[in-house]
Image (cartoon, rainbow, N blue to C red):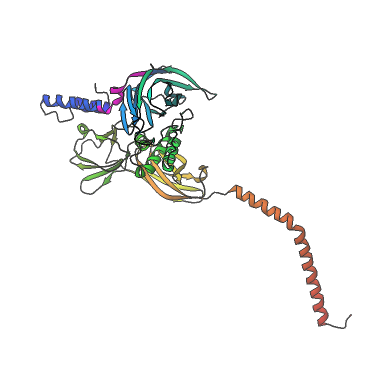
Amino acid sequence: MCMHPFILTLARSGGVPFSLPSGFRTIIRFGLCLLCWWFEPSFALAQQSISINVEGKIYRADIFWTIRHNNLDYKGVTIYSFDRSLSATFDLAVHFKFKNDSIPQDNNLVWGFQFNQTGDILFPPANEKRSRSARQFQRFDMRSTGEASLTIIPKIWKKLAGGGFEPLNMGTPFTLGFKITDSGGAALVSNNPAVDNLNGPNAGSTPEQPLAGKDQEESRAYAAATTMSDSTEKIKALIDFVDKYAAERPASPLVATAIKNVPLGTSLPKNRGDGSITYTLDYAVNPVIDTAGVQGWKWELSEFAFGRYELKLQDLGDSVHSIRIADLGKNAPFNRPRELRPFDRISVQLIGQDREFFQLKVEGGVPPFIVFLSQDKIPRERYILTRTDTVWSLRKSDCRLCKTGKHTLEVYNSDFSTLLLRAQNSIQIFRVNYYFAGLLGVLVISLFILLFKPLRRAWRMYRYERQMSEIEAWEKKEPGKF
């Protein structure tokens, strides 16, 4: 059954003009439903589900899993045979797919799984993984050969005021079996950067083999981004993570995971002057155009770099003023269809600044807009603009984390799908360093106390010598009066 609403719409319409014979439309509908099944692995591979009642609303998540060993993925399999000489570790990812992309809004709710090992071959033997992520990762070391099994229990917890977690519901346990051999031909090294310890303080152990410096840096950056509690800051941190590491490490599994958990980015439309309009799509995985909804437009979609596409639209007599696009490769809710409106006009300009404020002029678009100040590629402050067609004066002192120096200005629309303005190193902020100012004050006072008496004596000696010099000079001018 075709479950994705975007593909379902295409399937019902056949994705083609209705003038075609009904037999062709039936074939196309069947093909689109197969396409839907392909891009919705959670429904195809889900072995069970888990549900929870939050304030009278039922949230249900389908659960499936993937295991990666030696750069190969095994989806929904329960029995595995691994050669530990090829790689001494494997990664388990348990996926949670909430029905209709409806994720519980209660930030105190987390989900994940508990695991327990039968035997002593795998390490760690037991632990719990929990966060608000769609995927929970755990890395296991294979310490010897033989047979082992893992019992996995999906769970949902509620965070308590004291910092602990109370289980609210659990799914049906399932068991994964492993037969581990060793051909003895290769060194025991990992083929993946560590994905352990990426889901909060309850993550498992670190692999025995130390990671290279770049792997460690990337893992720490990913962990810092995914553990942010504020959803807006988390999205911005993941976007910055992809921007930094996608060019350097496009094959990284962490980059592949992060790019699925950020919105599809679209530039502002560029009118080429020949009746065509172009968009640049950023953080794209598998973008798809709703062909049934494109009326009066001819379009071309082409990839020109990792995660980046160009969408070219040719106006053939537009009648709807919008184009529907979805990225089927992203995780919910970022895979939902959205509309591009080529004829809409929006402008955000940095029109000035002084020591206290910087001014933005906003015209068109739909508020709110999100403004970030960043330094050294780290977001320092966030502002929210709630109105359009106005000039905003934003106080620099509101950025409490900003340091003295130049800051990059970025302005996004409300869902981070469009970068409206990026001004590199455009905002100059001056901060008084109170620590050094206080230290300098203490130093000046200390020097004054230490030098007061010597300076006082020197001043008195100076005045005395000057008076004596004046007397001698007077005596030389009028000798014999004394």
Q: Where residue 137 sits: x, y (%)? A: 40, 29
Q: Residue at x 43, y 17 (%)?
A: 169
> Is 239 drawn above or below residue 143 in the view shown?
below
Q: Where residue 178 sits: x, y (%)? A: 35, 23
Quarter occupied by the N terminus: top left
> Left or right: 28 with respect to 246?
left
> Left or right: 66 with respect to 432?
left
Number of marks in picture: 0
Q: Residue at x 81, y 78 (%)?
A: 474
Pick the residue in front: 99 or 315. Answer: 99
Q: Quadrant of residue 246?
A: top left
> Left or right: 281 with respect to 209?
left
Query: Quick one: which residue is furthest to the left in this view?
Result: 21
Query: Quick one: which residue is furthest to the front in this view?
Result: 184
Pick the residue in front: 376 or 90. Answer: 90
Quarter occupied by the C terminus: bottom right
Q: Residue at x 77, y 58 (%)?
A: 453
Instruction: Examine the rendering and report whether any part of residue 345 can be seen.
Output: yes
Segment colored magenta: 38-50
Q: Where residue 458 sits: x, y (%)? A: 76, 64
Query: Quick one: which residue is furthest to the right in this view?
Result: 482
Residue 43 shown in magenta = yes
Pick the residue in front: 352 or 222. Answer: 222
Q: Where residue 332 sits: x, y (%)? A: 34, 29
Residue 26 shown in magenta = no
Instruction: Examine the rendering and report whether any part of residue 332 can be seen.
Output: no
